[in-house]
Image: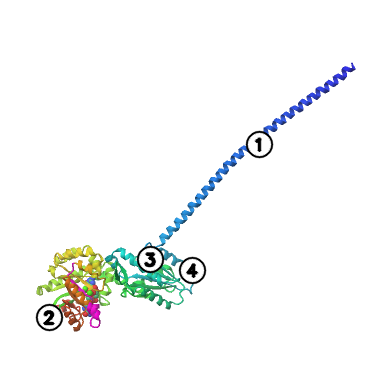
């Protein structure tokens, strides 16, 4: 029995131990399984992360390459921007800074200009540039501008900034000026550049310039006022006969106000009948007879008295008032011609046409109409245009002269020798007369080269079958010279000043009496 008890106890113990072991095993297995699961999970996660890392790496790499692409594009863009700016600020022909560049430069300088500092701007404008362009062609005009740029560069120093701000207009901006007195030297140097000829199309041409000068801050506190003032100085230089220079003066602006006033008075002058024509006799040098008159306008101003054309024709031209004024001149001169021709049927009447008038497309119709209205013999009408006007648009000039020549109206080239006379063009112009300018007559008795010029003009005219009339004859010596030189006609104070119509009639009659 005892044996059985022992066995039972041992059995229980064995069973318990077995159960314990089984439990332990179960726990172990469960734990092991859990660990493996976790391991698997971690592995999975690790793989995922690796995958994501690779993806990120790809994104990063592609971002990097896009970034370098972008930087390349940005560089390209800045380069483009730079070259566009360069283009916008550079004159294509001379490669000088242009007006935009100059204005920006001046703006910046003016903003920082100290009161004790002085800068100068010089506006250099080529005289009669249009004539060169028109008669030689634009490519020669361009060539001249390049040559001028080259020559100007030679005489400038590190304080000067040269720009081309318009067709034939250059600017020199000078900084660090010690004394404005020394500026005269710079102007001299610039002018010197133009004392020797430019070679264009294998020929030599002399070119002159008009220069306006303004200093800052004296002549303008802002870049706009300075530019405006240097511009008026340049115009004063032009008005003073070109080939000269003018320093800006505040009185210029006063003159401008006066100019505006005169313009408005000029507008009213037509309605108020304030214009009057004077007549200057034209003499045949052979017969010493009056063969015609030149009609010259005067303005009977209510307060200023008799005003001469040089004081208002250019204003009338600028404003376009020359069109109605010119029409009045033509009508009045033709009415007068009609009157005189009753008694003197061969007497001629010369009428001046301004540039704007001649270029007005209505000119042919106007002349036809006035001839019809007044009933004059159109063979006795002579229209005067300067050679500068004639050469401005040579094809138009030729066509217009031809149209009027059909009915017998003649044309004279006024102020001959002062403009840009090109013999080639003269040959093509269907004009009938050349008027030798007074300036040659002024010095003809002292200056042998003027004698030669007159002689040459007359010979040339003869060869081209043109009549020659000399203007501004004031003394007998000149008359003798002209007669010997075979000049046809003369006009000047020696015979008569321009006089009102009543006196002109007396002059005609007096001549009549002598004959
Ligand atoms: P222009 O056509 O060359 O006229 C000749 C000018 O020289 C006239 O000046 C005349 O008075 C002046 N003159 C003539 N002989 C002599 C002389 O012996 N000695 C001197 N010192 N001068 C002499 P004026 O009348 O003052 O005319 C000046 C300019 O005004 C004219 O020059 C012409 O270009 C323009 N003009 C005159 N009348 C008219 C007009 O009705 N229409 C247009 N468009 N222009 C005109
Ligand atoms: Ca004239
Ligand atoms: Ca003249």
The label number, if any, that marks residue 42 in the structure image? 1
Q: Is residue 205 left or right of residue 328?
A: right
Q: State the residue in front, 39 or 485.
A: 485
Image-based side of 69 in relation to 467, left or right:
right
Q: CA distance from mark 4 to mark 1?
A: 71 Å
Mark linked to residue 165: 3
Side of 64 where 163 appears, left or right = left
Which tag, 3 or 2, sits closer to the chain's start? 3
**Going from the N terminus, do you reach mark 2 or mark 4 first?**
4
Q: Which residue is mark 4?
A: 112
* Of labels 2 and 1, the one closer to you: 1
- Can residue 146 be seen here? The reply is yes
Q: Quadrant of ligand 2?
A: bottom left
Is residue 451 rendered magenta in the image?
A: yes
Give the label on residue 190, or none. none
| Mark toward the start of the polypeptide (2 vs 1) | 1
Cα separation, mark 2 vs mark 4, equals: 73 Å
Q: Which residue carries the number 2 mark? A: 511
What crowding class fits label 3: few (fewer than 14 Cα within 10 Å), some (14-19), or many (20 or more)? many
Whole-percent x, y for residue 229 in the image: 38, 71
Determine the residue located farthest toward the top in the rendered image: 1
**Tag 3 or tag 1, which sits nearer the N-term?**
1
The answer as to whether callout 3 falls within 8 Å of ligand 1 is no
Horizontal and vertical percent for residue 53? Answer: 59, 42
Magenta-highlighted residues: 430-452
């Amino acid at each position: 029995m005892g044996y059985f008890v022992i066995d039972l106890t041992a059995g229980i113990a064995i069973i318990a131990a077995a159960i314990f072991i089984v439990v332990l095993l179960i726990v172990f297995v469960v734990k092991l399984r859990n660990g493996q699961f976790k391991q698997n999970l971690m592995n999975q996660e690790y793989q995922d992360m690796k995958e994501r890392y690779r993806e990120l790496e790809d994104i990063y790499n592609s971002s990097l390459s896009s970034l370098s692409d972008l930087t390349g594009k940005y560089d390209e863009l800045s380069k483009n921007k730079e070259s566009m700016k360069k283009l916008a600020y550079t004159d294509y022909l001379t490669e000088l800074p242009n007006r935009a560049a100059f204005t920006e430069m001046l703006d910046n300088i003016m903003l920082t200009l100290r009161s004790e500092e002085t800068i100068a701007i010089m506006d250099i404008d080529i005289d009669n540039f249009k004539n060169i362009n028109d008669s030689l062609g634009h490519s020669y005009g361009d060539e001249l501008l390049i040559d001028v740029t080259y020559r100007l560069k030679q005489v400038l120093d590190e304080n000067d900034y040269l720009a081309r701000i318009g067709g034939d207009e250059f600017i020199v901006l000078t900084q660090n000026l010690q004394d404005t007195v020394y500026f005269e030297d710079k102007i001299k140097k610039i002018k010197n550049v133009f004392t020797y000829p430019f070679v264009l199309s294998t020929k030599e041409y002399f070119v002159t310039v008009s220069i306006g000068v303004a200093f800052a801050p004296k002549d303008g506190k802002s870049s706009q006022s300075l530019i405006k003032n240097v511009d008026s100085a340049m115009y004063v230089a032009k008005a003073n006969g070109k080939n000269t220079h003018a320093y800006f003066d505040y009185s210029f602006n006063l003159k401008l106000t006066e100019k505006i006033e005169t313009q408005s008075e000029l507008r009213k002058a037509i309605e108020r009948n304030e214009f009057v024509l004077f007549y200057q006799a034209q003499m045949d040098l052979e017969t010493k007879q009056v063969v015609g008159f030149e009609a010259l306008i005067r303005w009977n101003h209510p307060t200023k008295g008799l005003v001469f054309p040089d004081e208002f024709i250019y204003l009338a031209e600028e404003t376009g008032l020359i069109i109605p004024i010119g029409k009045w001149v033509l009508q009045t001169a033709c009415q007068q011609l009609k009157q005189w021709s009753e008694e003197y049927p061969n007497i001629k009447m010369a009428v001046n046409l301004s540039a704007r008038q001649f270029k007005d497309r209505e000119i042919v119709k106007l002349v036809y109409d006035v001839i019809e209205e007044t009933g004059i013999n159109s063979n006795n009408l002579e229209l005067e245009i300067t050679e500068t006007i004639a050469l401005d648009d040579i094809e138009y000039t030729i066509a217009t002269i031809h149209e009027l020549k059909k009915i017998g109206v003649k044309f004279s080239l006024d102020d001959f020798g002062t403009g840009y006379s090109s013999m080639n063009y003269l040959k093509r112009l269907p004009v009938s007369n050349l008027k030798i300018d007074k300036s040659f007559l002024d010095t003809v008795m002292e200056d042998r080269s003027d004698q030669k010029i007159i002689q040459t003009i007359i010979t040339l005219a003869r060869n081209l079958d043109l009549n020659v009339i000399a203007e501004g004859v004031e003394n007998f010596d000149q008359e003798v010279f002209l007669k010997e030189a075979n000049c046809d006609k003369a006009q000047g104070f020696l015979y008569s000043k321009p006089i009102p119509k009543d006196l002109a009639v007396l002059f005609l009659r007096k001549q009549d009496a002598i004959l």
